[in-house]
Image (cartoon, rainbow, N blue to C red):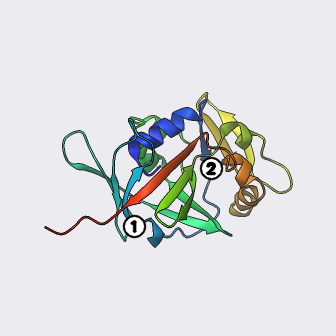
Amino acid sequence: MIVRVALFLLALSLLPGCVAFERAPVSKLRCDPALAGRWQPVKDGPLNNTVEIGPDCTLRWPNEAGGFHRATLAGFTLGDDRYLVFSPADADRVLAAEGDLIRSAPKGSVFLARYRIDGDNALLWLPDPQIALQAGTKGEATGRRIEDQFTYVEGNRKAIATLLRTRGDAMFRMAETRGTLALRRLPPEAAP
C-alpha cells in the first residue's frame, strides 16, 4: 500500500473484502528508515505513479488537483517480518476507498500490510480474508465476518502476534505472486 492506485488494485484483487485487525500486535509503532526514497511499481500500465517516502516516513503521492496526498507510514517487525499499520482513515486515503473504510471498520481497528525490502526492491502483501477467517486455534486471534466487506480479526496483542507468527506466510500469501505489489526504488533526482 505504498502507491495509492497500486494498493487499490491490490485490494481489489483480494476481494471479497478487506481484513481489519482489532489492534496492532505491538504497543509502539515505528518508522522504518529503509522505506525512504522514491518508489515506482515494477509493472507497466495503470500502476505507474511514483511516490515519495521521506526519512520521517511521510508518504506523498500526487493528487488530481496537482498537489499531493500525505500519510505517515508506521509499522513494526515480528522476527524478520515487517508490517505497516494503517488506521481506517489512513487506509481509506491510501486505498481511495472514499470513506468506506472509515464508516465500516470497527472503532480502534487497524489494517496491516506485510512487506520486504531487498536493496532497491520491495514487495508488499495485503492479508487474504479467507485465510484470516480460519484463524482461531492455538492461542491465536479469531477471525469473523462483519458485513459483507470485512473480515475482522479479534484478539489481544499477544494473540494477534501469535497469529502473524504462525500463519503470516499463508495469510499474506507470501509464496504467491497474486496479491503482490512489486516496487523499485528510483535513484535520487539530480539537484538543479
- The residue wearing badge 1 is 36
Residue at image x 60%, y 59%?
24
* Picture quadrant where residue 58 is located: bottom left
Task: Provide residue 11's location: percent of width, then percent of height.
Answer: 53, 38
Does residue 109 show up?
A: no
Badge 1 crowding class, 10 Å Cα cut-off, few under 14, some 14 to 19, many 20 or more, is some
Identity of the residue furthest to the top in this view: 148
Q: Secondary structure at mark 1?
A: loop
Q: How many marks?
A: 2
Q: Looking at the picture, tell me which residue is in the foreground, 44 or 141.
A: 44
Q: Is residue 97 left or right of residue 144?
A: left
- The residue wearing badge 2 is 21
Q: Which amino acid lies under the numbered mark 2 shown in the image of this protein?
A: Phe
Task: Provide residue 110's location: percent of width, then percent of height.
Answer: 55, 51
Identity of the residue furthest to the right in this view: 138
Q: Secondary structure at mark 2?
A: strand
* Picture quadrant where residue 37 is located: bottom left
Task: Provide residue 98's location: percent of width, then percent of height.
Answer: 39, 35
Q: Is residue 84 left or right of residue 80?
A: left
